[in-house]
Amino acid sequence: MTYATARLSDADIEALGSELDRIRADVVASRGERDASYIHTVIKVQRGLEVGGRTLLLGSLLPPLWLAGTAMLSAAKILENMEIGHNVLHGQWDWMRDPEIHSTTWEWDLVTPAAAWKHTHNDLHHTWTNVVGRDRDIGYTIIRMSEDQAWRPWHLAQPAYNLLLAAVFEWGIALFDLELDDVVHGRKSKRELFDQVRAVLGKAIRQAAKDYVLFPLLSGPSAVPTLVANLTANVVRNVWAHTTIFCGHFPDGVEQFTVAEVDGETRGGWYLRQLLGSANIDGSRLLHVLSGNLSHQIEHHLFPDLPSNRYAEIAPQVRALCGRFALPYTTGPLYHQAASAWKRVFRMAFPSHPRPSHPRPSHPRREAAAVAPYAMA
C-alpha cells in the first residue's frame, strides 16, 4: 500500500486527522505531576548510573570493575541521548516551564550541537517525513534507501560504510547537520558554514576532552582502561541509537513519498503520511525507555512534542484507528525490524528503477501543511 493507494477519500483523511487531534488534545489536557515525576526520575537514574559508572572506572584495572563501570556508563549515555536529550529537544517537557529541562536550554552529551540537530531533525525531518528530496534523513545523503534516489557506483559499498556509521553515529550526525550539500548548491553561504563548523568543533573538543582526557586522567593508574571504557560506552550508545532509528524508518512496510504525492497536503494528510511512513518495535517497558520510546515511532511521528511516557498509552488508540480506516500499523520485534532495515540497505546498494509516481487524485488546490507539527497544534 502506498500513500497514493491508501483508498481514503478526502473526507476520510480529514476524519482521521480529527480523531488524532482528539487523542493529542486529551494528552495535552491531562499532562501533569505524574509526567513531571517520570522525567525527573529518568534524569535522576541516568545521573546515578553515570556517577556510579565513572566511580567504578577509577578502579578499572580490575576487569570486574571495568565491565560494571562500562555497562553503567553505556546505559547512562543511552538514557541521556534517547529518553532525555532527544525528547527534551523536541519540546516534550517545555510545558513544565522548568529552565533545566527545556528545549531552549538543554545541551546533550553528543558531538552535534543541539541547535543544529533541532533544525535538521525537528524542522526538516518531522515536517517532510519520508518525502524523497525533502527529508534528508532518508539515507543521510550518503546511503541510498529509496528507489527514488539516484544510484551511484559507491552505493555498492553502503553496507560496509553503514556499519561504520553505526559505530561513529554521533560524528556522522554532526557532519550531516552541517548540510554541506547546501553549500555546494548555493543554498547556504560559506560564512554560515564556517560558523556552524566552529560550533561543532567547539562541542567536539569539549566532548573529547571530557571522555578521553579528563576522566582517564582522574583515574590515575587506570587511565588507559578508563579511556577504553569511555570509547566503548560511546560506541555502544551510537550503535543503539543507529539501530533504533533505522528500525523506525526503514523496515518493510514503511512507505516513502514523492513531492508530487504530498502536494496540497492537509493536516489530515500529514497525519496519514506519518502513519504510513513509520514503524514500531515490540518489546518490554525497559526496551521502550532505552529507545527513548522511539520504539513507538508511529506515535512519535504523529505527536513529536507529547511526553514520551504517554506513547505506550495512546498506541492502542492509534492502532485501533488504523484498523478502523483499513491502514497498516507496521510493528515487530527488534530483531525483525533491524533485519528488515538492513535488508533494505543491501537491496538499495544495487541499481533499481524508480517506483511509478502516483499523485493523489485531483482536488481543489490547498495549501500544503509543510509546517512542523508544533506549529500545527
Image: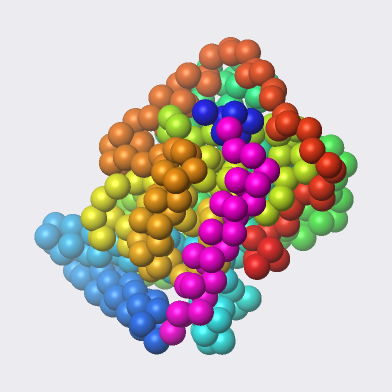
Residue 27 is a magenta residue: yes
Where residue 11 appears, as percent x and y from the top left, is 65, 47
Give the vertical position of 368 relative to 225 (above or below). above
> Which residue is depicted at the point 53% across and 53% down?
301
Q: Is residue 199 visible?
A: no
Tell me which colouring the rendered structure shows: rainbow
Is 65 left or right of 317, judged from the image as shown?
left
Residue under the point 44% across and 46% down: 324
Q: Which residues are magenta?
A: 7-32
Closer to the camera in the image, 252 or 334: 252
**In the rendered structure, does residue 197 fall within the stretch colored magenta?**
no
Picture mark count:
0
Res 198 seen here: yes
Describe residue 60's horizontal placement relative to residue 85 as left or right: left
Q: Write down the quadrant of residue 213 in the picture.
A: bottom left
**Residue at screen point 65% across, 25% down:** 149
- Percent position (x, y) of residue 182? 79, 43
Q: What kind of secondary structure does the magenta stretch mostly adopt? A: helix
For this rendering, which residue is in front, 28 or 230?
A: 28
| Image spot of residue 376 (x, y percent) | 68, 63
Q: Position of residue 248 (x, y in %)?
A: 44, 44
Can you say which quadrant of the picture contains the C terminus? bottom right
**Which residue is found at the position 60% from the left and 21% from the top?**
147
Q: Quadrant of residue 350?
A: top right
Closest to the observer, 319 or 376: 319
